[in-house]
Amino acid sequence: MTAKHDQYRRKAEGWSEHEYADGAAYLDRRAQVVVELGPPLRPGDEVLDLACGDGGLGAHLLRRGLRYRGVDATPEMVVAAQRALGQSAVVEEGDLDAYAPPGPVAATTVFRAIYYARDRRAFFERVAGFTTTKLVFDLNPRQYRMNDVLADLRSAGFDRVAVRPFFVPQRVALPRVASALLRGIERTGPLARLVLRARFTYLVAAWRSVDPT
Ligand SMILES: C[S@@+](CC[C@H](N)C(=O)[O-])C[C@H]1O[C@@H](n2cnc3c(N)ncnc32)[C@H](O)[C@@H]1O
């Protein structure tokens, strides 16, 4: 157990409230992008959220008529997510490098945790084996080279990719006008890329043009 993992145990209870200045707004926007980026999800589709933390994203996906399966390696996070979501979702303990759902899922998501995959390419290959519609994750371009990640996705069979900036601050709750302005900048191309040199992340959806399942 690393110091980081020990920290997750201690912070599990109330994770979403502490980590996100405006958790409801942040996670709702994330859920919206999960549904809309790349091939859209439809009510009834199942989302597998790997490294789900306290399952904060779950409520926002359930509200959109999706089914939610959360998986996390930290037992305290699993308990917090189970408590928050109750019978409306499945939450299990598991390692994202080894977990396989009982059947295919429409979407697999990984937020703020892609770096826990021991071998990113092998991880993408495993996910591709049980994901029918798309994989969605966030990527910090100051930490990873987009081209390296795209190459790993292609090699895993994800031949289609959609990438978009996600300019919702995690630790600051902005007034409405400022949020709207940032949302506008997400779509500006060069200006958005400039912003990404200093802050924020991309959201990436990857899928296969031919469904293998
Ligand atoms: C930064 S938190 C992100 C939680 C949530 N996805 C979010 O966006 O708020 C990282 C999470 O990854 C989990 N985690 C770390 N290593 C893992 C692994 N190998 N398999 C599954 N979960 C893991 C931690 O327990 C923690 O809940």
Image (cartoon, grey):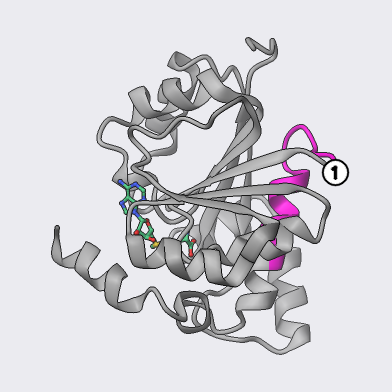
Residue of label 1: 43
Magenta-highlighted residues: 28-42
- Residue 126 drawn at (x, y percent): 43, 23
Front residue of 127/46: it is 46
Front residue of 120/44: it is 44
Quadrant placement of the N terminus: bottom left
Q: Residue at x 49, y 53 (%)?
A: 111
- Residue 74 drawn at (x, y percent): 32, 59
Q: Residue at x 49, y 81 (%)?
A: 171
View extreme (bottom): residue: 175
Quadrant placement of the C terminus: top right
**4 lies above or below 208:** below
- Residue 205 drawn at (x, y percent): 62, 37
**199 lies above or below 100:** below
Residue type highlighted by circle 1: Pro
- Residue 24 drawn at (x, y percent): 67, 76
Q: Residue at x 43, y 61 (%)?
A: 78
Residue 120 appears in the figure: yes
Residue 198 appears in the figure: no
**SS class of the residue under badge 1?**
loop
Categorize mark 1 by other alpha carbons within 10 Å: few (<14), some (14-19), many (20+).
few
Provide the major secondary structure of the magenta segment: helix
